[in-house]
Image (spheres, rainbow, N blue to C red):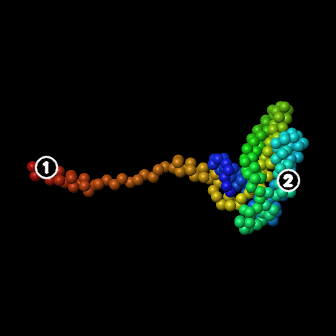
Amino acid sequence: MVSILPKPINELDEEVLRQYSKLTKKWEDKGRSRYILSNLFNVPSFVINYSFFSNLFISFLSGWNLSNDNITKPYGKEFNIQEESTRLEQGNPFIKTIDRITRLPLFLTGIGLTCYGAYEAISGFYNNDSQCTSDGLSHLLLGIPFVGVSSSQYIKDSDPKLLNRNSLFQIAYKGLKNKLSTPKVKPVTVPVEARRENYLHRLEDYLTQ
C-alpha cells in the first residue's frame, strides 16, 4: 500500500488498520464479504447521526460508505480472491485515497468523544448530576458515528499481510528496552607478564648493586 501520509501518521494509521485486519480476516475466513461487515458498522452510525445530530459531514461520509458498500464497490467486488495481482487490479484509487486521508482523523475524534462522553455520563450518574449525565450521553452518541464511519473505511481496506508485521507497540517496546538495557562490560586485558618481567629486572638490578 502506497503511503500518502507523513511517516508518523502513516505508521499510526497502519497500526489501526492492522487491528481491523484481524477482525476482517476472522470474518472472511467464514466466507463472508467485508462489505457486509462494513455495513454493520456504518448503518447504525448513519441512523444514530440522523436521529440525534444530523451532522452534515458524517451524513455525507455515511452515505458515501453506503453507496460504496452496496452499489459501486470501489474496493473490488470479491475479496476472497487469493491471487494478489487480481486483487490489486480491482477498486477505485480515488475513493481509496479519500478514505485513507479521512479515516484516522475520524477514528481519533470518535474515540476521544466516546471516551469523554462515557466519563461524563458515569461521573454524572454517581454524583446525581443529570446535566453532566445528559452531556456525557450527547458526546457519546456524537462520537459513535465517527467511530462507525472510520471502522467501515478501515474494514474495506484491510490487508492480511499487515498481520505478519510487528505491531507499532512491539516496535516501540523493543526500542525502549534496548535503550534501557545495561551495557555489556567488556573485559580489559592487563599485561601481567610484562609487569612481572619489569619487576624482576628491577629486583636483579637492586641485588647486583
202, above or below 55, in the image: below
Helix, strand, or loop for circle 1? helix
187, above or below 119, in the image: below
Residue 184, position in %: x, y? Answer: 45, 52
Mark number, residue 206? 1
Can residue 45 be seen here? The reply is no
Helix, strand, or loop for circle 2? helix
Q: Between residue 22 and residue 10, name the one nearer to us.
A: 10
Q: From the image, state whether disc 2 or disc 1 is nearer to you.
A: 2
Residue 54, position in %: x, y? Answer: 87, 40
Residue 60, position in %: x, y? Answer: 84, 45
Q: Between residue 3 and residue 48, name the one nearer to us.
A: 3
Q: Between residue 121 and residue 99, name the one nearer to us.
A: 99
Q: Which residue is painted at 53% across and 51% down in the image?
A: 178
Q: Which residue is painted at 10% across and 52% down in the image?
A: 208
Residue 154 in the figure: left or right of residue 47: left
- The amino acid type, in three-letter code, at marker 2 is Ser
Q: CA distance from mark 2 to mark 1?
A: 103 Å
Q: Which residue is mark 2?
A: 67
Q: Mark 1 and mark 2 in contact (Cβ < 8 Å)?
A: no
Mark number, residue 133? none
Residue 7 in the figure: left or right of residue 194: right
Residue 3, position in %: x, y? Answer: 66, 52
Which quadrant holds residue 21?
bottom right
Mark 1 surroundings within 10 Å by alpha-carbon count, few (fewer than 14), some (14 through 19), many (20 or more)? few
Q: Which residue is painted at 68% across and 61% down in the image?
A: 161
Residue 106 in the figure: left or right of residue 205: right
Which quadrant holds residue 136?
top right
